[in-house]
Image (spheres, rainbow, N blue to C red):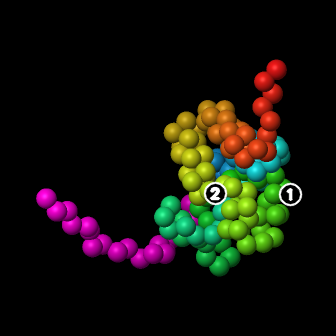
Amino acid sequence: MAYQIAKYHPDPTPKRKAAKKADYLSFLHSLPCVVSGRYGVHAAHVSFANPYYLHYGRGKGSKADDRWALPLHPECHTAQHATNERDWWNAQGINPHELALILFGAWSAMGDDAEPFCAAKINQLLVDAGRYERDLS
């Protein structure tokens, strides 16, 4: 039996204001930096588009939805914006769109109770990238 692919082609750049979630941004401040593991983070928005994850970037003078924010130490946040953002994330070995959706999904499901799960996810990324040594003593 053959299946037909839907012929619906939505406008690739939806026209709506970015969703702001102050509670989520506050939650991100409780997490470690996804690059360095340090605390005292900013909620840094991923600006570049990736339609695969339904992120269409941002408009002039506006930020992306808060679901596309990640916890970054101020030094890392500055570095994120100092160069081509896509290249910077690639150099870190992090898919920011996927990670942002994981953290936002956990928070959406569990609220502030998601903190230990999200911190563990970030710590595992740091271990996998060789940026963090677990103390096994």
Q: Residue at x 79, y 40 (%)?
A: 132
Is there any visible trace of residue 63 in the rendered image?
no
Which type of secondary structure does the marked residue at label 1 adopt? helix
How far across and down, in percent of the image, does residue 23 sit?
A: 64, 47
How far across and down, in percent of the image, does residue 65 sit?
A: 59, 61
Task: For label 1, count other residues whose C-alpha is less than 10 Å away and answer few (under 14), some (14-19) or many (20+).
Answer: few
Q: Is residue 20 above or below residue 81?
A: above
* Residue range highlighted in magenta: 1-20
Q: Amino acid at mark 1?
A: Glu
Q: Tell me the chief SS of the magenta region.
A: loop
Number of the label disc, if any, that sits on residue 75 = 1
Q: Earlier in the sequence, mark 2 or mark 1?
A: 1
Give 35 or 132, whichever is nearer the viewer: 132
Q: Amino acid at mark 2?
A: Pro
Quadrant, the N terminus = bottom left
Q: Residue at x 20, y 62 (%)?
A: 3
Left or right: where 11 falls relative to 74: left
Quadrant, the C terminus = top right
Q: Which residue is mark 2?
A: 96
Which type of secondary structure does the marked residue at label 2 adopt? helix
Q: Is residue 88 above or below residue 124?
A: below
